[in-house]
Image (cartoon, helix red, strand yellow):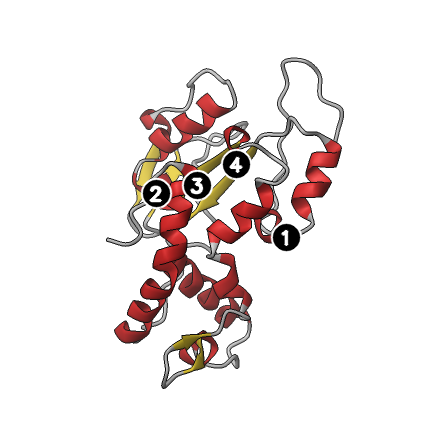
Amino acid sequence: MPKTLEGQITMEKTPSYFVTREAPARISAMSRETKLIVVVRDPVTRVISDYTQTLSKRPDIPSFESLTFKNRTTGLIDTSWSAIQIGIYAKHLDNWLQYFPMDQILFVSGERLISDPAGELGRVQDFLGLKRIITDKHFYFNQTKGFPCLKKAEGSSKPHCLGKTKGRTHPNINPEVVQRLRDFYRPFNMKFYQMTGRFFGWDD
């Protein structure tokens, strides 16, 4: 990480940190004062999205259903599939809490980042001790993508929207499979809500 002067904030993002077993110890060894921001979304939507992304790169992969179940008859979920593992947020958070206190970790709702980007980024600005500069007036909703876009990116006169890889149409998944996944994640979600003190509403 680069040297940071007083009054500066240095940021770095890597999606795999939260689920990498060794990451908390390494980051803590570098700086125990580090503030951590994690964007989380409904783990069922997340696993389908993960599969959609892989499918776009490797169209020959097995069906979603066959990857989801260890045994389709009994409905046993295959937790060895990394896409399933990632959404067990409570388990990953347990690992981080061995090195960082909860007040140094902010969980951002992926759903609210779409429905209310300014509100969710307000929480981020507060968490980082920054003045609330980003507001509703900085965003417009892109109907085609289904995501908010920045009206004007820093140093550019053009708006900034998420790239081509975002907002892909998800394949149709059997509703029974989706329900089975909801049932599987529910206890982990409940534990995660308790740990974070925030209700994300994924089980409605």
Disc 1, SS: loop
Residue at the (39%, 26%) spot, across then down: 122
Q: Which residue is mark 4?
A: 37
Secondary structure beneath label 3: helix
Q: Is residue 200 left or right of residue 165?
A: left
180 on left or right of 71: left
Report the amino acid beneath label 1: Thr
Identify residue for label 2.
114
Precedes in sequence: disc 2 or disc 4: 4
Nearer to me, 120 or 22: 22
Among the two numbered marks 3 and 4 on one chain, the one whose residue lies closer to the N terminus? 4
- Label 2: state its secondary structure: helix
Task: Residue 28 in the image: state x and y as whole percent.
Answer: 69, 35
Tell me how far mark 1 sits from mark 2, CA to CA: 26 Å
In front of the other: label 3 or label 4? 3
Q: Name which of mark 2 and mark 3 comes first in the sequence.
A: 2
SS for tag 4?
A: strand
Query: Rounded to the nearest whole Å, what is the CA distance between mark 3 and mark 1?
Result: 19 Å
Q: In this rendering, which labeled residue sits more in front, label 4 or label 1?
A: 1
Dot 3 amino acid type? Met
Whole-percent x, y for residue 97 in the image: 57, 40
The dot on residue 20 is 1
- Residue 150 is left or right of residue 98, and the answer is left
Provide the residue designation for mark 3. 195
Q: CA distance from mark 2 to mark 3?
A: 24 Å
